[in-house]
Image (spheres, rainbow, N blue to C red):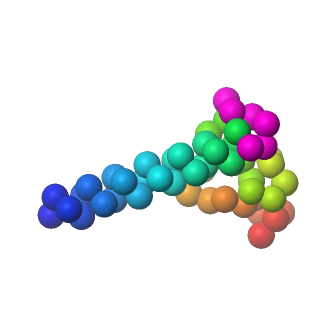
Amino acid sequence: MFEVHYNEEMEAEVQRLEAKNRAAAAGHPEWDNACAVCGCQLASITIDRCDHCL
């Protein structure tokens, strides 16, 4: 049980850091996430591309 919870927390943290890195790479380090293709701001950290770039 502990391992599952720990793994979920670590996966969420990795997702958050990857999203933050995409935003910084897009030139907006103050954002939480940015599209990996066009660089627009994304509201969720669980996605890496906007609807237009899918």
Q: Is residue 44 visible?
A: yes
Q: What residue do we see at 41% from left, 58% from top?
A: 11
For image coordinates 67% across by 30% down, the residue present is: 30
As drawn, is 47 to the left or to the right of 16? right
Residue 47 pos. (x, y %): 62, 59
Q: Do we see residue 45 in this rendering?
A: no
Which residue lies at the image location 51% right of the left edge and 54% below the top edge?
15
Which secondary structure class fits the magenta region best? loop
Q: Residue furthest bottom?
A: 54
Side of 49 relative to 7 (left or right): right
Q: Is residue 28 magenta?
A: yes
Q: Which quarter of the rendered picture does the N terminus lie within?
A: bottom left
User: Residue 33: horizontal and vertical position, in percent?
Assistant: 65, 45
The quadrant holding residue 49 is: bottom right
Which quadrant holds residue 6?
Answer: bottom left
Is residue 3 placed above or below 42 in the rendered structure?
Answer: below
Spot occupied by residue 46 in the image (x, y as percentages of width and height): 56, 57
Q: Nearer the viewer, residue 34 or 18?
A: 18
Q: How many marks?
A: 0
Residue at the farthest top position: 30
- Residue span colored magenta: 25-30
Residue shown at 80% from the left, 49% from the top: 39
Q: Name the quadrant of the C terminus.
A: bottom right
Task: Tell me, yes or no, whether the highlighted magenta stretch contains residue 32.
Answer: no
Front residue of this view, candidates 43 and 15: 15
Task: Tell whether 10 sits left or right of 40.
Answer: left
